[in-house]
Amino acid sequence: MKILSNSSGRRLGGIERMVENLDSQAEKYGHELVLVSRSVDTTRDYINFDKSPRTWFFGSGFQNAFTASIRGSRNSRDMSEMIGVYKPKFKRVIEEEKPDIALLNGTSGIPYILSRACVDLGVPYVVAIRGILSKEEPLAGNKIENEMVRDSAQVVYISNVCKEHFEKNNGKVSESSVIYNSISRNFLRNSEREGTGIGWVGRNSAIKRLGFFLEIMAKLSSSEEIEIITNNGMYPKNMSPNISYLPIIDGIKELSDFYASKRVMVSTSEFETWGNVPFESLLSGTPIVVSKDMGVSEVLGILDLEKLIVQEGSIEEYIHRINLASKTLISREQRHLLANHFSIENMALKYFTLLENVRDKQLNRAHNFLNRLKNQPFPTSYSTSHPAVQVWASPQL
């Protein structure tokens, strides 16, 4: 089965990780993955045959143009122009690759316009909700998400928190399932660790609330070291001598070493459909404080660590949960439970099974439709209401 999908183009993004994990298992199950992505280093469109999976890249201006179109005009003119430029390009990808099905990750930019191309060419698609556009751009976001869900064969949520928030914004979805994100076993640490200090990892964006984390640290009354990994050149101005800023880390081993070196990790995101950082921190053996509005909070529930989940979100509650986390041990058994339950192999098998079922259902519908046509009694001829016109029909299909 050939599967058309999309990636974000971000080095450490959640979509990028998921696509890499799926691709690592595709050949084992007899599938082929082909991607559409945005280029981050050039404005031109091109195909990379050397990259696995094979990837059709579209110029770096794509996402900027899409963002401008949903934030600009309050009517549909800007979006229509955007679709008019890129849908023919995406239809060319489909016509050349001839996929059996598409797995569209997210609802913003490439997956949305790719879904319009799939509809035009009759390719069934499953949409995996990995972010909720309507929470950021309610006017355009609701329209885009409703269109994608309406025309999809199935909707996948990456957590129950994701499902709850999405359906609160867009209404209940009839055909849906929940498939959690997976995690690489390379984050797993078998030995116990003795970390010091507090860590924070993430992009310096409004939803991650790095500024709020700094407020919490200012009131924590702790002199221990605080290390923050975030975008280069995006560091808030802070002169506290115990706070250090580090650039984004690429490698899994380096990230795992960072998590393991900390006594406690903190995630201050206001909302996330999942949250890779807490997931990775737990597998590395370091307790982390998260909000109940993060999908990954369900993982803490599986480990009976609800005491690390922030309910109300005040600075005082975060400090209380951090103090609880500093006395919490993530046992070897808990780490292995996570590694096995959320393995790449399990996640990939669930996606491939779902995609196969959707494809088979679509093929059965088409087969049944053709059978109904074949069983209909076709007249050798029939006449329109005009006596001078006669239309002939073949009794055989």
Image (cartoon, rainbow, N blue to C red):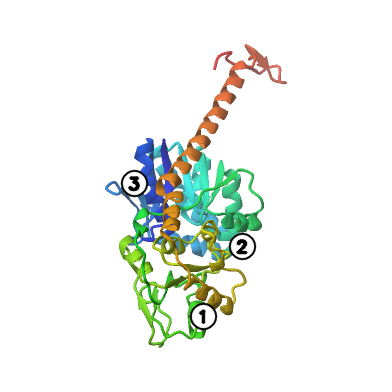
Disc 3 to disc 2, C-alpha distance: 34 Å
Q: Which mark is residue 138?
A: 2
Q: Residues within 10 Å of mark 1 (few under 14, many from 20)?
A: some
Mark 3–mark 1 CB contact (< 8 Å): no
Is any atom of residue 72 visible in this view?
Answer: no
- Towards the viewer: 390 or 296: 296
Residue 305 percent coordinates (x, y)? 53, 63
From the viewer's side, name the closer residue of 357 and 255: 255
Mark whose residue sits in front, 2 or 1: 1
Task: Count residues near mark 3 (Cα–Cα under 10 Å), then give few for <14, some for 14-19, many for 20+.
Answer: some
- Residue drawn where x is 62% and y is 11% of the image: 380
Which residue in the structure is indicated by mark 3? 53
Chain-order first, disc 3 or disc 2: 3
Asked if one can make out residue 385 in the rendered structure from this viewpoint, the answer is yes
Label 1 sits on residue? 216
Callout 3 amino acid: Pro
Q: Nearer the viewer, residue 125 or 122?
A: 125
Query: Cα distance, mark 2 to mark 1?
Result: 30 Å
| Farthest residue, direction left | 50
- Please provide percent x and percent y for residue 378: 63, 15
Rendered image quadrant of residue 61 = bottom left
Q: Earlier in the sequence, mark 2 or mark 1?
A: 2
Q: Secondary structure at mark 1?
A: helix
Quadrant location, the N terminus: top left
Q: Type of residue at label 2?
A: Pro
